[in-house]
Image: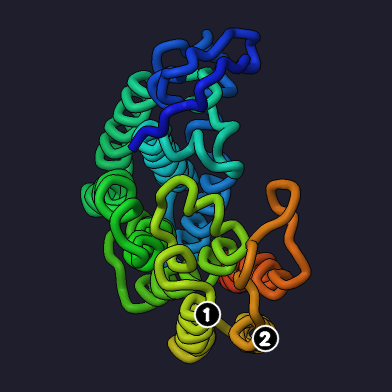
Amino acid sequence: MSQTAPAFSSADDAGQTRPASAPDGDWAASTAQPSAWLDYVMLMKPRVMSLVIFTALTGLVCADRPMHPALAVIAILCIAIGAGASGALNMAYEADIDALMKRTKSRPIPRGRVRKGDAAAFGLVLAAFSVMLMGLGVGLAPAAILAFTIFFYAVIYTMLLKRWTPQNIVIGGAAGAFPPLLGWAAASGDAPLNAWLMFAIIFFWTPPHFWALSLYTATDYASAGVPMMPVVKGPKSTRRQILAYSLLLVPIGIAPAFTGLGGGLYLATAGIGGAIFLGLAIRLALSKAGDGEPGATGLYAVKPGAREARDLFAVSIFYLFALFAALLAEHGWKALVH
Protein backbone atom coordinates (compact mmCIF):
# COMPACT_ATOMS: atom_id res chain seq x y z
CA MET A 1 0.00 0.00 0.00
CA SER A 2 1.63 3.18 -1.15
CA GLN A 3 0.49 6.74 -0.88
CA THR A 4 1.46 9.38 -3.38
CA ALA A 5 3.37 12.34 -2.00
CA PRO A 6 1.77 15.81 -2.20
CA ALA A 7 2.28 17.65 -5.47
CA PHE A 8 5.25 19.65 -4.30
CA SER A 9 8.86 18.94 -3.57
CA SER A 10 10.23 18.55 -0.06
CA ALA A 11 13.66 17.99 1.40
CA ASP A 12 14.67 14.99 3.48
CA ASP A 13 17.08 14.95 6.43
CA ALA A 14 20.08 14.67 4.13
CA GLY A 15 19.02 17.68 2.11
CA GLN A 16 17.88 15.79 -0.98
CA THR A 17 14.76 16.91 -2.83
CA ARG A 18 11.92 14.44 -2.97
CA PRO A 19 10.21 14.13 -6.41
CA ALA A 20 6.69 15.53 -6.29
CA SER A 21 5.11 12.44 -7.81
CA ALA A 22 7.16 9.72 -6.13
CA PRO A 23 5.41 7.42 -3.64
CA ASP A 24 7.03 7.71 -0.20
CA GLY A 25 7.97 4.04 0.06
CA ASP A 26 9.39 3.82 -3.46
CA TRP A 27 11.30 7.05 -3.02
CA ALA A 28 12.84 5.88 0.25
CA ALA A 29 13.74 2.51 -1.23
CA SER A 30 15.48 4.01 -4.25
CA THR A 31 17.35 6.86 -2.57
CA ALA A 32 18.50 5.28 0.68
CA GLN A 33 21.56 6.99 2.10
CA PRO A 34 24.55 4.98 3.32
CA SER A 35 23.42 3.40 6.57
CA ALA A 36 25.33 3.15 9.82
CA TRP A 37 25.38 0.15 12.12
CA LEU A 38 22.88 1.92 14.37
CA ASP A 39 20.30 1.90 11.58
CA TYR A 40 20.47 -1.89 11.50
CA VAL A 41 20.18 -2.03 15.27
CA MET A 42 17.01 0.05 15.01
CA LEU A 43 15.64 -2.38 12.41
CA MET A 44 15.72 -5.05 15.13
CA LYS A 45 13.36 -3.03 17.39
CA PRO A 46 15.66 -2.99 20.43
CA ARG A 47 12.92 -1.91 22.87
CA VAL A 48 10.76 -4.87 21.86
CA MET A 49 13.83 -7.09 21.95
CA SER A 50 14.53 -6.10 25.55
CA LEU A 51 11.07 -7.31 26.61
CA VAL A 52 11.57 -10.52 24.64
CA ILE A 53 14.89 -11.16 26.39
CA PHE A 54 13.38 -10.48 29.80
CA THR A 55 10.37 -12.79 29.38
CA ALA A 56 12.47 -15.50 27.71
CA LEU A 57 14.97 -15.39 30.56
CA THR A 58 12.11 -15.67 33.03
CA GLY A 59 10.81 -18.76 31.23
CA LEU A 60 14.27 -20.31 31.19
CA VAL A 61 14.79 -19.75 34.93
CA CYS A 62 11.26 -20.85 35.85
CA ALA A 63 11.85 -24.24 34.21
CA ASP A 64 14.01 -25.05 37.27
CA ARG A 65 16.29 -27.27 35.22
CA PRO A 66 20.09 -27.18 35.52
CA MET A 67 21.53 -25.67 32.36
CA HIS A 68 25.13 -24.90 31.49
CA PRO A 69 25.61 -21.11 31.59
CA ALA A 70 27.09 -21.11 28.09
CA LEU A 71 24.04 -22.90 26.69
CA ALA A 72 21.74 -20.53 28.56
CA VAL A 73 23.53 -17.55 27.01
CA ILE A 74 23.29 -19.13 23.54
CA ALA A 75 19.57 -19.78 24.01
CA ILE A 76 18.80 -16.20 25.07
CA LEU A 77 21.05 -14.83 22.32
CA CYS A 78 19.22 -16.88 19.70
CA ILE A 79 15.84 -15.72 20.97
CA ALA A 80 17.05 -12.10 20.92
CA ILE A 81 18.42 -12.43 17.37
CA GLY A 82 15.19 -14.13 16.28
CA ALA A 83 13.20 -11.21 17.68
CA GLY A 84 15.50 -8.83 15.81
CA ALA A 85 14.95 -10.79 12.61
CA SER A 86 11.18 -10.51 13.06
CA GLY A 87 11.49 -6.76 13.59
CA ALA A 88 13.61 -6.26 10.48
CA LEU A 89 11.25 -8.31 8.30
CA ASN A 90 8.29 -6.41 9.74
CA MET A 91 9.87 -3.04 8.94
CA ALA A 92 10.80 -4.14 5.43
CA TYR A 93 7.23 -5.16 4.63
CA GLU A 94 5.55 -2.22 6.37
CA ALA A 95 7.81 0.57 5.08
CA ASP A 96 4.92 2.15 3.20
CA ILE A 97 2.62 2.50 6.21
CA ASP A 98 5.51 3.37 8.54
CA ALA A 99 6.13 6.44 6.40
CA LEU A 100 2.57 7.64 7.06
CA MET A 101 2.49 7.34 10.85
CA LYS A 102 4.00 9.77 13.37
CA ARG A 103 5.01 6.88 15.62
CA THR A 104 7.02 5.10 12.92
CA LYS A 105 8.05 7.62 10.25
CA SER A 106 11.50 8.09 11.81
CA ARG A 107 12.40 4.43 11.33
CA PRO A 108 15.43 3.69 9.08
CA ILE A 109 13.55 2.76 5.90
CA PRO A 110 11.09 5.70 5.78
CA ARG A 111 13.99 8.05 6.49
CA GLY A 112 15.88 6.61 3.53
CA ARG A 113 18.68 5.20 5.69
CA VAL A 114 18.18 1.54 4.71
CA ARG A 115 16.69 0.05 1.55
CA LYS A 116 13.74 -2.29 1.90
CA GLY A 117 15.60 -5.10 0.15
CA ASP A 118 18.59 -4.73 2.44
CA ALA A 119 16.34 -4.81 5.51
CA ALA A 120 14.58 -7.94 4.26
CA ALA A 121 17.90 -9.66 3.52
CA PHE A 122 19.19 -8.66 6.95
CA GLY A 123 16.10 -10.12 8.61
CA LEU A 124 16.32 -13.39 6.67
CA VAL A 125 19.99 -13.85 7.52
CA LEU A 126 19.33 -13.19 11.21
CA ALA A 127 16.39 -15.60 11.18
CA ALA A 128 18.39 -18.41 9.58
CA PHE A 129 21.36 -17.83 11.88
CA SER A 130 19.28 -17.77 15.08
CA VAL A 131 17.35 -20.94 14.23
CA MET A 132 20.44 -22.88 13.15
CA LEU A 133 22.43 -21.82 16.20
CA MET A 134 19.53 -22.74 18.50
CA GLY A 135 19.22 -26.15 16.85
CA LEU A 136 22.93 -26.91 16.95
CA GLY A 137 23.68 -25.44 20.35
CA VAL A 138 20.55 -26.01 22.41
CA GLY A 139 18.09 -28.41 20.78
CA LEU A 140 15.71 -29.07 17.91
CA ALA A 141 12.51 -28.42 19.91
CA PRO A 142 13.37 -24.83 20.89
CA ALA A 143 14.76 -24.25 17.38
CA ALA A 144 11.45 -25.35 15.85
CA ILE A 145 9.48 -23.08 18.20
CA LEU A 146 11.80 -20.18 17.38
CA ALA A 147 11.38 -20.74 13.63
CA PHE A 148 7.60 -20.85 14.01
CA THR A 149 7.62 -17.67 16.13
CA ILE A 150 9.55 -15.74 13.48
CA PHE A 151 7.27 -17.07 10.74
CA PHE A 152 4.16 -16.23 12.76
CA TYR A 153 5.21 -12.62 13.34
CA ALA A 154 6.67 -11.91 9.90
CA VAL A 155 4.08 -13.74 7.78
CA ILE A 156 0.90 -14.49 9.73
CA TYR A 157 0.76 -11.20 11.63
CA THR A 158 2.64 -8.71 9.43
CA MET A 159 1.63 -9.89 5.96
CA LEU A 160 -1.74 -11.57 6.50
CA LEU A 161 -3.42 -10.02 9.53
CA LYS A 162 -2.33 -6.48 10.30
CA ARG A 163 -3.76 -4.82 7.20
CA TRP A 164 -6.87 -6.96 6.89
CA THR A 165 -8.58 -7.48 10.24
CA PRO A 166 -9.18 -5.53 13.46
CA GLN A 167 -8.38 -8.79 15.26
CA ASN A 168 -4.74 -8.41 14.14
CA ILE A 169 -3.52 -7.68 17.66
CA VAL A 170 -5.47 -10.55 19.21
CA ILE A 171 -4.19 -13.26 16.89
CA GLY A 172 -0.82 -11.66 16.28
CA GLY A 173 -0.30 -11.34 20.03
CA ALA A 174 0.72 -14.99 20.07
CA ALA A 175 4.05 -14.02 18.51
CA GLY A 176 4.90 -11.82 21.49
CA ALA A 177 3.73 -14.53 23.90
CA PHE A 178 6.16 -17.20 22.70
CA PRO A 179 9.44 -15.99 24.33
CA PRO A 180 8.83 -17.42 27.85
CA LEU A 181 7.71 -20.66 26.24
CA LEU A 182 10.90 -20.62 24.18
CA GLY A 183 13.04 -20.02 27.23
CA TRP A 184 11.37 -22.86 29.10
CA ALA A 185 11.75 -25.26 26.17
CA ALA A 186 15.41 -24.32 25.80
CA ALA A 187 16.05 -25.27 29.44
CA SER A 188 13.92 -28.41 29.67
CA GLY A 189 13.18 -29.57 26.13
CA ASP A 190 9.43 -29.50 26.78
CA ALA A 191 6.60 -27.03 27.41
CA PRO A 192 4.35 -28.00 30.34
CA LEU A 193 1.21 -26.27 31.58
CA ASN A 194 3.09 -23.60 33.53
CA ALA A 195 5.04 -22.61 30.42
CA TRP A 196 1.78 -22.20 28.51
CA LEU A 197 0.37 -20.23 31.43
CA MET A 198 3.17 -17.67 30.97
CA PHE A 199 2.28 -17.65 27.27
CA ALA A 200 -1.39 -17.02 28.15
CA ILE A 201 -0.57 -14.07 30.40
CA ILE A 202 1.17 -12.21 27.57
CA PHE A 203 -1.44 -13.31 25.02
CA PHE A 204 -4.38 -11.89 27.00
CA TRP A 205 -2.36 -8.84 28.08
CA THR A 206 -1.66 -7.78 24.48
CA PRO A 207 -5.15 -6.62 23.36
CA PRO A 208 -5.89 -4.26 26.28
CA HIS A 209 -2.32 -2.95 26.13
CA PHE A 210 -2.32 -2.08 22.41
CA TRP A 211 -5.96 -1.12 22.11
CA ALA A 212 -5.51 1.38 24.94
CA LEU A 213 -2.68 2.94 22.90
CA SER A 214 -4.73 2.85 19.70
CA LEU A 215 -7.60 4.75 21.35
CA TYR A 216 -5.51 7.91 21.40
CA THR A 217 -3.48 7.27 18.23
CA ALA A 218 -6.40 6.17 16.05
CA THR A 219 -5.93 8.95 13.49
CA ASP A 220 -2.39 7.69 12.91
CA TYR A 221 -3.65 4.19 12.11
CA ALA A 222 -6.56 5.50 10.05
CA SER A 223 -4.29 7.65 7.87
CA ALA A 224 -2.12 4.60 7.19
CA GLY A 225 -5.09 2.35 6.45
CA VAL A 226 -4.40 -0.02 9.35
CA PRO A 227 -7.71 -1.53 10.61
CA MET A 228 -7.08 -1.18 14.33
CA MET A 229 -10.13 -1.79 16.52
CA PRO A 230 -11.01 1.89 17.22
CA VAL A 231 -10.83 2.66 13.49
CA VAL A 232 -13.09 -0.23 12.44
CA LYS A 233 -15.43 -0.78 15.40
CA GLY A 234 -15.22 2.60 17.10
CA PRO A 235 -13.96 3.74 20.52
CA LYS A 236 -16.97 2.51 22.51
CA SER A 237 -16.67 -1.06 21.26
CA THR A 238 -12.91 -0.95 21.81
CA ARG A 239 -13.33 0.18 25.42
CA ARG A 240 -15.75 -2.69 26.06
CA GLN A 241 -13.40 -5.23 24.52
CA ILE A 242 -10.51 -3.91 26.58
CA LEU A 243 -12.59 -4.52 29.71
CA ALA A 244 -13.55 -8.01 28.52
CA TYR A 245 -9.92 -9.02 27.95
CA SER A 246 -8.92 -7.43 31.27
CA LEU A 247 -11.52 -9.56 33.06
CA LEU A 248 -9.88 -12.63 31.52
CA LEU A 249 -6.33 -11.44 32.06
CA VAL A 250 -6.45 -10.73 35.80
CA PRO A 251 -7.46 -14.26 36.94
CA ILE A 252 -5.04 -15.79 34.45
CA GLY A 253 -2.35 -13.54 35.91
CA ILE A 254 -3.14 -14.82 39.42
CA ALA A 255 -3.37 -18.49 38.38
CA PRO A 256 0.41 -19.24 38.57
CA ALA A 257 0.21 -18.77 42.36
CA PHE A 258 -2.04 -21.86 42.46
CA THR A 259 -0.21 -24.08 39.95
CA GLY A 260 3.16 -24.10 41.70
CA LEU A 261 4.73 -21.63 39.31
CA GLY A 262 4.44 -18.60 41.58
CA GLY A 263 4.78 -18.18 45.34
CA GLY A 264 3.80 -15.61 47.93
CA LEU A 265 5.61 -12.72 46.30
CA TYR A 266 3.99 -13.49 42.99
CA LEU A 267 0.50 -13.81 44.54
CA ALA A 268 0.84 -10.40 46.19
CA THR A 269 2.16 -8.82 42.99
CA ALA A 270 -0.52 -10.37 40.78
CA GLY A 271 -3.28 -9.55 43.26
CA ILE A 272 -2.40 -5.90 43.77
CA GLY A 273 -1.35 -5.34 40.16
CA GLY A 274 -4.46 -7.09 38.86
CA ALA A 275 -6.75 -4.98 41.03
CA ILE A 276 -5.13 -1.78 39.75
CA PHE A 277 -5.24 -2.99 36.14
CA LEU A 278 -8.89 -4.01 36.36
CA GLY A 279 -9.83 -0.76 38.09
CA LEU A 280 -8.26 1.25 35.29
CA ALA A 281 -9.97 -0.94 32.67
CA ILE A 282 -13.37 -0.31 34.30
CA ARG A 283 -12.58 3.41 34.49
CA LEU A 284 -11.70 3.37 30.80
CA ALA A 285 -14.86 1.46 29.86
CA LEU A 286 -16.96 4.10 31.61
CA SER A 287 -15.08 6.97 29.97
CA LYS A 288 -15.32 8.56 26.54
CA ALA A 289 -11.65 7.98 25.72
CA GLY A 290 -11.16 7.89 21.97
CA ASP A 291 -14.40 9.72 21.17
CA GLY A 292 -14.04 12.82 19.03
CA GLU A 293 -10.59 13.82 17.86
CA PRO A 294 -8.03 11.41 19.38
CA GLY A 295 -4.55 12.56 20.24
CA ALA A 296 -3.04 16.00 20.63
CA THR A 297 0.05 17.90 19.58
CA GLY A 298 3.11 15.68 19.82
CA LEU A 299 3.64 11.96 19.33
CA TYR A 300 2.37 10.73 22.69
CA ALA A 301 0.50 13.83 23.88
CA VAL A 302 -3.02 13.04 25.02
CA LYS A 303 -6.09 15.22 25.23
CA PRO A 304 -7.86 15.21 28.62
CA GLY A 305 -10.64 12.99 27.29
CA ALA A 306 -8.20 10.21 26.41
CA ARG A 307 -6.16 10.13 29.62
CA GLU A 308 -7.97 7.01 30.85
CA ALA A 309 -6.59 5.15 27.84
CA ARG A 310 -3.11 6.56 28.35
CA ASP A 311 -3.14 5.58 32.03
CA LEU A 312 -4.13 1.98 31.32
CA PHE A 313 -1.51 1.72 28.58
CA ALA A 314 1.23 2.97 30.91
CA VAL A 315 0.20 0.78 33.85
CA SER A 316 -0.10 -2.29 31.62
CA ILE A 317 3.64 -2.14 30.94
CA PHE A 318 4.50 -2.07 34.64
CA TYR A 319 1.93 -4.79 35.36
CA LEU A 320 3.47 -7.29 32.93
CA PHE A 321 6.99 -6.42 34.06
CA ALA A 322 6.04 -6.88 37.73
CA LEU A 323 4.50 -10.31 37.12
CA PHE A 324 7.55 -11.66 35.34
CA ALA A 325 9.98 -9.95 37.71
CA ALA A 326 8.27 -11.67 40.66
CA LEU A 327 8.56 -15.06 38.96
CA LEU A 328 12.20 -14.41 38.07
CA ALA A 329 13.00 -13.35 41.62
CA GLU A 330 11.32 -16.37 43.22
CA HIS A 331 12.82 -18.98 40.92
CA GLY A 332 16.19 -17.25 40.78
CA TRP A 333 16.35 -17.25 44.58
CA LYS A 334 15.36 -20.93 44.64
CA ALA A 335 18.19 -21.76 42.24
CA LEU A 336 20.71 -19.83 44.38
CA VAL A 337 19.58 -21.54 47.59
CA HIS A 338 19.75 -25.00 46.11
Which is more toward the observer, 295 or 204? 295
Query: In screen coordinates, is 8 left or right of 302?
Result: left
**Residue at figure coordinates x 59%, y 57% from the top left:** 217
Which residue in the structure is indicated by mark 2? 283
Task: Residue 256: give x, y in percent of width and height.
Answer: 48, 83
Q: Amino acid at mark 1?
A: Lys
Name which quarter of the figure residue 94 lies in: top left
Query: In screen coordinates, is 324 left or right of 226?
Result: right
Query: Looking at the rendered structure, which numbered label has been put on residue 38?
Result: none
Which is more toward the observer, 141 or 293? 293
Name which quarter of the figure residue 331 lies in: bottom right
**Residue at figure coordinates x 32%, y 23% from the top left:** 121
Which residue in the structure is indicated by mark 1? 236
Which is more toward the observer, 225 or 283? 225
Q: Amino acid at mark 2?
A: Arg
Q: Which structural element holds mark 1? A: helix
**Residue at figure coordinates x 48%, y 26% from the top left:** 5
**Residue at figure coordinates x 36%, y 64% from the top left:** 166
Query: In screen coordinates, is 263 left or right of 87?
Result: right
Sequence-wise first label, 1 or 2: 1
Q: Is residue 261 visible?
A: no
